[in-house]
Image: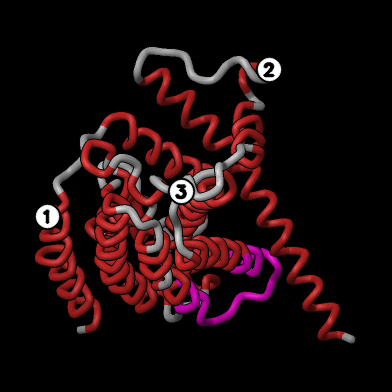
Protein backbone atom coordinates (compact mmCIF):
# COMPACT_ATOMS: atom_id res chain seq x y z
CA UNK A 1 0.00 0.00 0.00
CA UNK A 2 2.84 2.37 0.84
CA UNK A 3 4.45 1.63 -2.53
CA UNK A 4 1.27 2.57 -4.42
CA UNK A 5 0.85 5.77 -2.39
CA UNK A 6 4.44 6.83 -3.03
CA UNK A 7 4.10 5.99 -6.74
CA UNK A 8 0.89 8.02 -6.95
CA UNK A 9 2.60 10.91 -5.16
CA UNK A 10 5.54 10.88 -7.58
CA UNK A 11 3.17 10.65 -10.56
CA UNK A 12 1.07 13.59 -9.40
CA UNK A 13 4.11 15.73 -8.57
CA UNK A 14 5.60 14.98 -11.99
CA UNK A 15 2.27 15.77 -13.69
CA UNK A 16 1.94 19.07 -11.84
CA UNK A 17 5.54 19.95 -12.74
CA UNK A 18 4.88 19.14 -16.39
CA UNK A 19 1.72 21.29 -16.48
CA UNK A 20 3.40 24.23 -14.76
CA UNK A 21 6.44 24.06 -17.06
CA UNK A 22 4.24 23.87 -20.17
CA UNK A 23 2.25 26.91 -19.03
CA UNK A 24 5.56 28.71 -18.54
CA UNK A 25 6.62 27.57 -22.02
CA UNK A 26 3.45 29.07 -23.53
CA UNK A 27 4.14 32.47 -21.99
CA UNK A 28 7.86 32.12 -22.70
CA UNK A 29 7.11 31.79 -26.41
CA UNK A 30 4.83 34.81 -26.24
CA UNK A 31 7.44 36.83 -24.34
CA UNK A 32 10.12 35.86 -26.83
CA UNK A 33 8.01 37.01 -29.75
CA UNK A 34 7.27 40.32 -28.02
CA UNK A 35 10.92 40.96 -27.11
CA UNK A 36 12.11 40.03 -30.60
CA UNK A 37 9.50 42.40 -32.00
CA UNK A 38 10.82 45.32 -29.96
CA UNK A 39 14.42 44.41 -30.82
CA UNK A 40 13.46 44.63 -34.51
CA UNK A 41 11.46 47.85 -33.90
CA UNK A 42 8.03 46.37 -34.47
CA UNK A 43 5.15 45.14 -32.34
CA UNK A 44 4.83 41.51 -31.42
CA UNK A 45 1.53 39.62 -31.02
CA UNK A 46 -1.08 42.00 -29.61
CA UNK A 47 -4.45 40.95 -31.07
CA UNK A 48 -5.54 37.70 -29.39
CA UNK A 49 -6.73 38.34 -25.84
CA UNK A 50 -5.64 41.25 -23.68
CA UNK A 51 -2.34 42.57 -25.10
CA UNK A 52 -1.93 39.30 -27.01
CA UNK A 53 -1.67 37.11 -23.88
CA UNK A 54 -3.68 34.29 -25.49
CA UNK A 55 -1.65 34.18 -28.71
CA UNK A 56 0.29 31.03 -27.74
CA UNK A 57 -2.92 29.13 -26.90
CA UNK A 58 -4.48 30.23 -30.21
CA UNK A 59 -1.40 28.98 -32.07
CA UNK A 60 -1.59 25.66 -30.20
CA UNK A 61 -5.25 25.25 -31.15
CA UNK A 62 -4.46 26.06 -34.78
CA UNK A 63 -1.62 23.51 -34.92
CA UNK A 64 -3.64 20.73 -33.30
CA UNK A 65 -6.70 21.27 -35.52
CA UNK A 66 -4.82 21.76 -38.78
CA UNK A 67 -5.86 19.33 -41.53
CA UNK A 68 -3.23 17.31 -43.39
CA UNK A 69 -3.82 15.71 -46.79
CA UNK A 70 -2.98 12.01 -46.79
CA UNK A 71 0.39 11.18 -48.47
CA UNK A 72 1.19 14.88 -48.75
CA UNK A 73 4.14 14.54 -46.41
CA UNK A 74 6.34 11.47 -46.49
CA UNK A 75 7.59 10.25 -43.14
CA UNK A 76 8.38 6.81 -41.80
CA UNK A 77 7.42 5.32 -38.46
CA UNK A 78 11.06 5.86 -37.53
CA UNK A 79 10.38 9.59 -37.36
CA UNK A 80 7.46 9.02 -35.00
CA UNK A 81 9.82 7.05 -32.76
CA UNK A 82 12.16 10.05 -32.64
CA UNK A 83 9.32 12.39 -31.69
CA UNK A 84 8.10 10.02 -28.97
CA UNK A 85 11.65 9.66 -27.63
CA UNK A 86 11.98 13.44 -27.43
CA UNK A 87 8.65 13.67 -25.59
CA UNK A 88 9.79 10.89 -23.23
CA UNK A 89 13.00 12.83 -22.52
CA UNK A 90 11.07 16.00 -21.78
CA UNK A 91 8.71 14.18 -19.41
CA UNK A 92 11.71 12.55 -17.71
CA UNK A 93 13.25 16.00 -17.20
CA UNK A 94 10.01 17.01 -15.49
CA UNK A 95 10.20 13.91 -13.26
CA UNK A 96 13.74 14.81 -12.19
CA UNK A 97 12.62 18.39 -11.65
CA UNK A 98 9.73 17.31 -9.44
CA UNK A 99 11.94 14.94 -7.40
CA UNK A 100 14.13 17.88 -6.39
CA UNK A 101 11.17 19.59 -4.70
CA UNK A 102 9.47 16.47 -3.31
CA UNK A 103 12.21 15.69 -0.78
CA UNK A 104 13.38 12.57 -2.63
CA UNK A 105 16.58 13.42 -4.46
CA UNK A 106 18.95 10.62 -5.49
CA UNK A 107 22.64 10.93 -4.73
CA UNK A 108 23.24 10.17 -8.43
CA UNK A 109 20.82 12.83 -9.70
CA UNK A 110 23.31 14.46 -12.07
CA UNK A 111 24.32 11.07 -13.49
CA UNK A 112 20.69 10.35 -14.34
CA UNK A 113 20.53 13.77 -15.95
CA UNK A 114 23.58 12.87 -18.06
CA UNK A 115 21.89 9.64 -19.15
CA UNK A 116 18.81 11.56 -20.31
CA UNK A 117 20.91 14.15 -22.12
CA UNK A 118 22.77 11.41 -23.99
CA UNK A 119 19.47 10.34 -25.62
CA UNK A 120 19.16 13.65 -27.44
CA UNK A 121 21.36 12.57 -30.36
CA UNK A 122 19.30 9.42 -30.97
CA UNK A 123 16.01 11.31 -31.00
CA UNK A 124 17.34 13.96 -33.40
CA UNK A 125 18.75 11.32 -35.76
CA UNK A 126 15.41 9.50 -35.79
CA UNK A 127 13.42 12.69 -36.40
CA UNK A 128 15.57 13.79 -39.35
CA UNK A 129 16.44 10.44 -40.88
CA UNK A 130 12.83 9.29 -40.98
CA UNK A 131 11.64 12.42 -42.80
CA UNK A 132 12.82 11.37 -46.30
CA UNK A 133 14.19 14.87 -46.77
CA UNK A 134 17.80 15.78 -47.52
CA UNK A 135 17.57 19.05 -45.59
CA UNK A 136 16.23 17.23 -42.52
CA UNK A 137 18.91 14.55 -42.88
CA UNK A 138 21.73 17.09 -42.96
CA UNK A 139 20.12 18.93 -40.08
CA UNK A 140 19.86 15.82 -37.90
CA UNK A 141 23.52 14.90 -38.54
CA UNK A 142 24.57 18.42 -37.56
CA UNK A 143 22.39 18.37 -34.46
CA UNK A 144 23.46 14.92 -33.31
CA UNK A 145 27.16 15.70 -33.64
CA UNK A 146 26.67 19.05 -31.92
CA UNK A 147 24.83 17.26 -29.12
CA UNK A 148 27.71 14.78 -28.70
CA UNK A 149 30.14 17.71 -28.66
CA UNK A 150 28.17 19.43 -25.94
CA UNK A 151 27.80 16.23 -23.88
CA UNK A 152 31.58 15.82 -23.71
CA UNK A 153 31.88 19.39 -22.40
CA UNK A 154 28.89 18.89 -20.11
CA UNK A 155 30.37 15.74 -18.58
CA UNK A 156 33.69 17.43 -17.79
CA UNK A 157 31.93 20.37 -16.12
CA UNK A 158 29.67 18.11 -14.05
CA UNK A 159 32.64 16.02 -12.86
CA UNK A 160 34.53 19.20 -12.01
CA UNK A 161 31.65 20.60 -9.94
CA UNK A 162 31.00 17.23 -8.31
CA UNK A 163 34.59 17.13 -7.10
CA UNK A 164 34.03 20.47 -5.38
CA UNK A 165 30.60 19.61 -3.95
CA UNK A 166 31.59 16.08 -2.91
CA UNK A 167 28.87 14.23 -4.80
CA UNK A 168 26.42 14.15 -7.69
CA UNK A 169 23.36 14.87 -5.57
CA UNK A 170 21.55 18.09 -6.27
CA UNK A 171 21.49 18.78 -2.53
CA UNK A 172 25.31 18.79 -2.42
CA UNK A 173 25.49 20.98 -5.49
CA UNK A 174 23.05 23.50 -4.03
CA UNK A 175 25.02 23.59 -0.78
CA UNK A 176 28.61 23.70 -2.04
CA UNK A 177 28.53 25.17 -5.53
CA UNK A 178 27.76 28.68 -4.26
CA UNK A 179 29.11 31.22 -6.77
CA UNK A 180 31.26 28.57 -8.45
CA UNK A 181 31.10 30.62 -11.65
CA UNK A 182 33.59 32.98 -9.99
CA UNK A 183 35.98 30.09 -9.28
CA UNK A 184 35.64 28.62 -12.78
CA UNK A 185 34.51 31.47 -15.06
CA UNK A 186 35.71 29.60 -18.16
CA UNK A 187 33.54 26.61 -17.24
CA UNK A 188 30.49 28.87 -16.92
CA UNK A 189 31.21 30.40 -20.34
CA UNK A 190 31.60 26.93 -21.88
CA UNK A 191 28.42 25.77 -20.16
CA UNK A 192 26.36 28.66 -21.55
CA UNK A 193 27.84 28.05 -25.00
CA UNK A 194 26.94 24.38 -24.75
CA UNK A 195 23.35 24.88 -23.68
CA UNK A 196 22.82 27.29 -26.59
CA UNK A 197 23.93 24.45 -28.87
CA UNK A 198 21.90 21.81 -27.02
CA UNK A 199 18.72 23.92 -27.23
CA UNK A 200 19.41 24.81 -30.89
CA UNK A 201 19.49 28.54 -30.26
CA UNK A 202 21.27 31.35 -32.09
CA UNK A 203 24.22 31.58 -32.75
CA UNK A 204 24.44 27.76 -32.69
CA UNK A 205 21.11 26.88 -34.31
CA UNK A 206 22.69 24.62 -36.91
CA UNK A 207 19.65 22.33 -36.97
CA UNK A 208 17.34 25.15 -38.07
CA UNK A 209 19.65 27.26 -40.23
CA UNK A 210 17.03 28.79 -42.54
CA UNK A 211 19.60 30.05 -45.06
CA UNK A 212 20.67 26.53 -46.10
CA UNK A 213 18.36 24.01 -44.42
CA UNK A 214 14.88 25.56 -44.87
CA UNK A 215 13.43 24.61 -41.47
CA UNK A 216 15.79 21.76 -40.66
CA UNK A 217 14.28 18.99 -38.57
CA UNK A 218 10.79 20.52 -38.76
CA UNK A 219 10.60 20.65 -42.57
CA UNK A 220 8.32 17.61 -42.97
CA UNK A 221 6.31 18.00 -39.77
CA UNK A 222 2.99 19.63 -38.98
CA UNK A 223 0.11 19.37 -36.50
CA UNK A 224 0.86 17.42 -33.30
CA UNK A 225 4.42 16.21 -34.18
CA UNK A 226 5.53 19.76 -34.98
CA UNK A 227 3.93 20.99 -31.74
CA UNK A 228 5.79 18.33 -29.76
CA UNK A 229 9.14 19.21 -31.33
CA UNK A 230 8.56 22.91 -30.79
CA UNK A 231 7.32 22.64 -27.20
CA UNK A 232 9.98 20.14 -26.10
CA UNK A 233 12.71 22.51 -27.32
CA UNK A 234 11.42 25.28 -25.06
CA UNK A 235 10.84 22.90 -22.15
CA UNK A 236 14.45 21.70 -22.32
CA UNK A 237 15.53 25.34 -22.50
CA UNK A 238 13.77 26.05 -19.21
CA UNK A 239 15.24 22.94 -17.54
CA UNK A 240 18.79 23.90 -18.52
CA UNK A 241 18.24 27.48 -17.36
CA UNK A 242 17.03 26.18 -14.00
CA UNK A 243 19.94 23.75 -13.74
CA UNK A 244 22.43 26.51 -14.55
CA UNK A 245 21.16 28.54 -11.59
CA UNK A 246 21.87 25.55 -9.32
CA UNK A 247 25.23 24.42 -10.68
CA UNK A 248 26.89 27.84 -10.81
CA UNK A 249 24.87 29.97 -8.39
CA UNK A 250 24.08 27.40 -5.71
CA UNK A 251 20.33 27.84 -6.02
CA UNK A 252 20.39 31.39 -4.62
CA UNK A 253 17.78 33.69 -6.18
CA UNK A 254 16.80 30.71 -8.31
CA UNK A 255 13.81 32.33 -10.01
CA UNK A 256 15.74 35.50 -10.86
CA UNK A 257 18.79 33.63 -12.20
CA UNK A 258 16.61 31.20 -14.18
CA UNK A 259 14.69 34.05 -15.80
CA UNK A 260 18.00 35.79 -16.51
CA UNK A 261 19.19 32.76 -18.44
CA UNK A 262 15.87 32.64 -20.29
CA UNK A 263 16.24 36.30 -21.23
CA UNK A 264 19.77 35.56 -22.39
CA UNK A 265 18.36 32.96 -24.80
CA UNK A 266 16.00 35.56 -26.24
CA UNK A 267 18.69 38.26 -26.45
CA UNK A 268 21.09 35.87 -28.21
CA UNK A 269 18.47 35.00 -30.82
CA UNK A 270 17.70 38.64 -31.52
CA UNK A 271 21.27 39.99 -31.72
CA UNK A 272 24.01 37.41 -32.35
CA UNK A 273 24.92 36.20 -35.86
CA UNK A 274 25.23 32.51 -36.66
CA UNK A 275 28.76 31.07 -36.35
CA UNK A 276 30.17 28.67 -38.92
CA UNK A 277 29.65 25.04 -37.96
CA UNK A 278 33.26 23.93 -38.46
CA UNK A 279 34.55 26.83 -36.33
CA UNK A 280 32.29 25.81 -33.46
CA UNK A 281 33.21 22.11 -33.60
CA UNK A 282 36.95 22.82 -33.78
CA UNK A 283 36.69 25.26 -30.88
CA UNK A 284 34.80 22.78 -28.69
CA UNK A 285 37.07 19.78 -29.32
CA UNK A 286 40.45 21.53 -29.57
CA UNK A 287 40.15 24.16 -26.84
CA UNK A 288 37.18 23.63 -24.55
CA UNK A 289 37.90 19.98 -23.74
CA UNK A 290 41.59 20.78 -23.26
CA UNK A 291 40.87 23.63 -20.81
CA UNK A 292 38.39 21.52 -18.85
CA UNK A 293 40.77 18.56 -18.58
CA UNK A 294 43.55 20.87 -17.34
CA UNK A 295 41.13 22.36 -14.78
CA UNK A 296 40.19 18.83 -13.71
CA UNK A 297 43.82 17.92 -12.96
CA UNK A 298 44.42 21.24 -11.17
CA UNK A 299 41.52 20.52 -8.82
CA UNK A 300 42.62 16.92 -8.40
CA UNK A 301 46.18 17.75 -7.37
Residue 184's quadrant in the figure? bottom left
Residue 264 image offset from top left, x and y in percent: 38, 39
Label whose residue precedes the other's in the sequence (2 or 3)? 2
Q: How many marks?
A: 3
Nearest to viewer (mark 3 / mark 1): 3
> Where are the magenta residues, as a range?
95-113
- Name the residue: 24% across, 66% down: 149
Determine the CA span between mark 2 and mark 1. Answer: 45 Å
Nearer to me, 52 or 170: 52
Q: Mark 2 highlights which residue?
A: 50
142 on left or right of 235 = left
Residue 23 image offset from top left, x and y in percent: 65, 43
- Tell me if residue 150 is in the magenta stretch: no
Q: Mark 3 highlights which residue?
A: 73
Nearest to viewer (mark 2 / mark 1): 1
Q: Mark 1 highlights which residue?
A: 278
Residue 141 image offset from top left, x and y in percent: 26, 62
Amino acid sequence: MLFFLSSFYFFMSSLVSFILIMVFVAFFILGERKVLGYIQMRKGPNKVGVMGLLQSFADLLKLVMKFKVVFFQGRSWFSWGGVLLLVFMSCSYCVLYSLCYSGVSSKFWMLWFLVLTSLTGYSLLSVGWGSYNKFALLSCVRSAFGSVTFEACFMCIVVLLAMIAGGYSLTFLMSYSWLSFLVFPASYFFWVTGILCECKRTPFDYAEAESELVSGLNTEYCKVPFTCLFACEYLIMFIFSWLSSILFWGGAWMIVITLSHVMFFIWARGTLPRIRYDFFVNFMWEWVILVLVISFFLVLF
